[in-house]
């Protein structure tokens, strides 16, 4: 259990997923986490579970050791204006999960030499299965280690070069949506060939999970595992080739490329 107090500024989809993941992993107790949101009433359920909730970002920052920035890129500058007077550069660590905003962008906007580490988790953090990419330009090694161990308790984390953070956003954070859509599409196919929708979804999801685990647990390559499924003149290769003729791999590659391009231009430095 960490002794530190965390303020999560902007408790929407990812901010709340992070808070829930940290508590589920027993790294933090709800009382050690302050959640902020402009409409604080939307956090009433969390307040009942013991989290501190407030709309006052500056007050939340005043009592925090670790400050997580989790607003949209276009909401960041206003938030930084609000909290700037209460920042204690010597003792506080900033973790930004905001896409397309560099550590230098944050220091430059604040005009302060704060410790900033970027983390790009995904929503599976809420259940301890995030793939989180971590980057910093000049944070202390001790702080980097602290952030890495924090995210390791809620999934798997790797440290990457900061220039690759927009790519990490597309592949891992947006990636959850891409894989979910493929599972949904598989379930729709399943319904068309005879299964009730809820059964088809469960069957597709478990099949996707098994496929991912084959790669993760056996450290094998997708094509190696595909070769084991595709019998000569069989139905798997027939289905797979039909999907490829319709652009399956190409659609995924192009979508990830476009997402990465978009992630790089989400933030306008002047707000
Ligand atoms: N949703 C995801 O899967 C991921 C999102 N991110 C990044 O996390 C950030 C947040 O994304 P989401 O959670 O999806 O957005 P969201 O819109 O669900 O959450 C942002 C929250 O911040 C609140 N907010 C805005 N301004 C505020 C202020 N001044 N004070 C307090 N609260 C304020 C909003 O009311 C909202 O609840 C974005 O920058 C995004 O790029 C990163 C990784 C994954
Ligand atoms: O769609 C977005 O812009 C955010 C960033 C990663 C996931 N959601």
Image: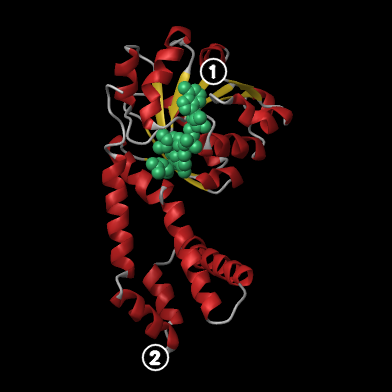
Which numbered circle lies on residue 187?
A: none
Where in the image, quadrant-wise, is ligand 2 located?
top left
Q: Position of residue 47 (x, y in %)?
A: 69, 27
Look at the picture and state if 216 lies above or below 105.
below
Q: Secondary structure at mark 1?
A: loop
Q: Quadrant of residue 224?
A: bottom left
Task: Tell which of 88 and 224 is nearer to you.
Answer: 88
Residue 271 seen anywhere in this rendered image of the structure: yes
Q: Position of residue 28 (x, y in %)?
A: 64, 30
Query: Residue 120 vs residue 111: left or right?
Result: right
Mark 2 and mark 1 lie on one chain; the one further toward the N terminus is 1
- CA distance for labels 2 and 1: 60 Å
Q: Residue at x 38, y 83 (%)?
A: 237
Q: Quadrant of the C terminus?
A: top left
Q: Secondary structure at mark 2?
A: loop
In the rendered image, the residue lying farthest to the top is 85
Q: Position of residue 112 (x, y in %)?
A: 35, 12
Query: Which residue lies under the disc numbered 1?
Result: 65
Neighbour tally class for label 2: few under 14, some 14-19, many 20 plus, Cα within 10 Å: few
Look at the picture and state if 104 lies above or below 207.
above
Query: Residue 238 vs residue 193: left or right?
Result: left
Q: Quadrant of residue 261?
A: top left
Q: Quadrant of residue 62?
A: top right
Q: Quadrant of the N terminus?
A: top right
Q: Does the numbered disc 1 mark a residue whose Cβ is under 8 Å from ligand 1?
A: no
């Amino acid at each position: 259990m960490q002794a530190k107090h965390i303020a999560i500024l902007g408790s929407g989809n990812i901010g709340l997923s992070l808070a829930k993941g940290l508590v589920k992993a027993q790294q933090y107790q709800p009382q050690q986490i302050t959640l902020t949101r402009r409409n604080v009433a939307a956090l009433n359920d969390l307040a009942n579970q013991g989290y501190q909730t407030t709309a006052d970002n500056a007050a939340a920052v005043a009592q925090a050791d670790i400050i997580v920035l989790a607003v949209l890129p276009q909401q960041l500058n206003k938030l930084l204006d609000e909290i700037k007077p209460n920042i204690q550069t010597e003792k506080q660590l900033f973790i930004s999960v905001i896409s397309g905003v560099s550590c230098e962008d944050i220091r430059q906007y604040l005009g302060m030499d704060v410790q900033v580490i970027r983390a790009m988790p995904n929503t599976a953090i809420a259940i301890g299965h995030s793939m989180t990419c971590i980057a910093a330009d000049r944070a202390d090694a001790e702080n980097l280690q602290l952030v890495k161990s924090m995210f390791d308790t809620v999934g798997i984390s790797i440290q990457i070069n900061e220039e690759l953070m927009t790519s990490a956003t597309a592949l891992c954070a947006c990636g959850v949506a891409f894989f979910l859509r493929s599972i949904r599409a598989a379930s729709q196919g399943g319904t068309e060939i005879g299964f009730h929708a809820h059964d088809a979804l469960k069957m597709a999801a478990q099949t996707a999970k098994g496929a991912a685990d084959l790669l993760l647990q056996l450290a094998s390559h997708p094509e190696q595992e595909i070769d084991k499924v595709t019998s000569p003149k069989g139905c798997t290769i027939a289905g797979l080739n039909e999907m490829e003729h319709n652009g399956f791999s190409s659609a995924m590659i192009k979508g990830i490329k476009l997402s990465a391009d978009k992630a790089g231009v989400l933030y306008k430095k002047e707000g």
